[in-house]
Amino acid sequence: MSDFFSKVKHDAFKGDYLTRLLYLNIAVFLAFSLTNAFASLFTGNFGLIPNIADDLLALPSNPLKFALRPWTILTYMFTHFGFRHILFNMIILYFSGKMLMEYLGERRMLSLYIYGGIGGGILYIILYNISPILTSGSMVGASAGVIAILVAGALYMPNMPVRLWGIFEVKYWMLAAGLVLLDVLNLTSENAGGHIAHLGGAIVAFFFIRSMRSGNEWNVYLFQVIDFVRGGFQPRQRKRKKGFSFGERNYKKSAQKNTTSKADGTGDIARMNAILDKIKATGYDSLTKEEKAFLFKISKD
């Protein structure tokens, strides 16, 4: 049992970004469900925790409420209140995320999830405030980010065969186009907010892949923000003062860095590891001609 929990802990905090997304969504759902169960048991108020969670985590369509709760543009995409809702989203996220990571890398996959969720949330707020038939409310769910990942995969590898329910085989672009068409046809349904968010995610995916092919990587901007936030939480290390010794003329440093490189092959190993990390993060296609030639040379030695 201890090995199981150790693996879960490792995957949740040090696994690839797809695994971490799955764990985070499931953790938020379990925290909500357990808190709601115990609160209902002891207070008799079955709507207490859902109302609190809706206020704190759900994305409101009212611009004034959103201005008072701007963090909900992020929290809503990790929040689910129903079991079938999270099950459906996590299944699609797992399979579409796996395929996308294999070809484009995990950083692009994470960026699509975040950007798609933000794009879907913004479109949701805009349409709910300009349409006369849509009433105000709030929205939760990962589907905007999930659809962004799925549509991006279909745009990048449209002819990849996908087997539905283990029976029907279709092209990837057909699956994505069918889901987007269903969203368009259901814009006035009871779950209009969810379908609007899906379309927002699909739009983000289109421009993400288009920008990537033109050499503009959106994931770079996201990870600049992530690195900045990480730097704010990490304690600063004090720089050690270098020692000095008295000399005939001036102070001389007592230790100097050895800038000469060793000819024992460690430089090649370090470079190879850096290239492999780059492949894992952004895919093989992101390598330069020089890096590809270096890998080819190493494989022949």
Image (cartoon, grey):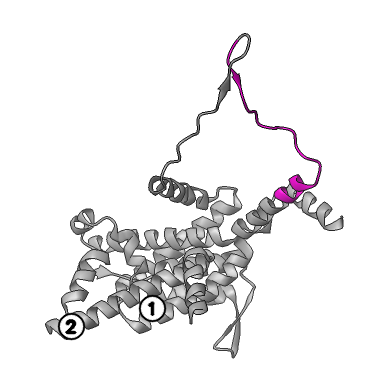
Q: Which residue is mark 1?
A: 86
In the picture as drawn, the residue positioned furthest to the bottom comes out as 167
- Within the magenta stretch, is there residue 252? yes
Q: Residue 163's x, y, as percent?
A: 59, 84
- 251 with respect to 92 (left or right): right
Q: Which residue is mark 2?
A: 40
Q: Which residues fall within the magenta stretch?
A: 250-271
What residue do we see at 45% from left, 68% from top?
A: 21
Task: Decide which of 263, 288 is in the foreground and name it.
Answer: 263
Residue 80 in view (yes/no): no
Task: Decide which of 93, 197 is in the foreground and name it.
Answer: 93
Q: Amino acid at mark 1?
A: Ile
Q: Residue 122's x, y, as percent?
A: 33, 58
Task: Decide which of 210, 276 is in the foreground and name it.
Answer: 276
Q: Is residue 109 above or below residue 229?
A: below
Q: Amino acid at mark 2?
A: Ser
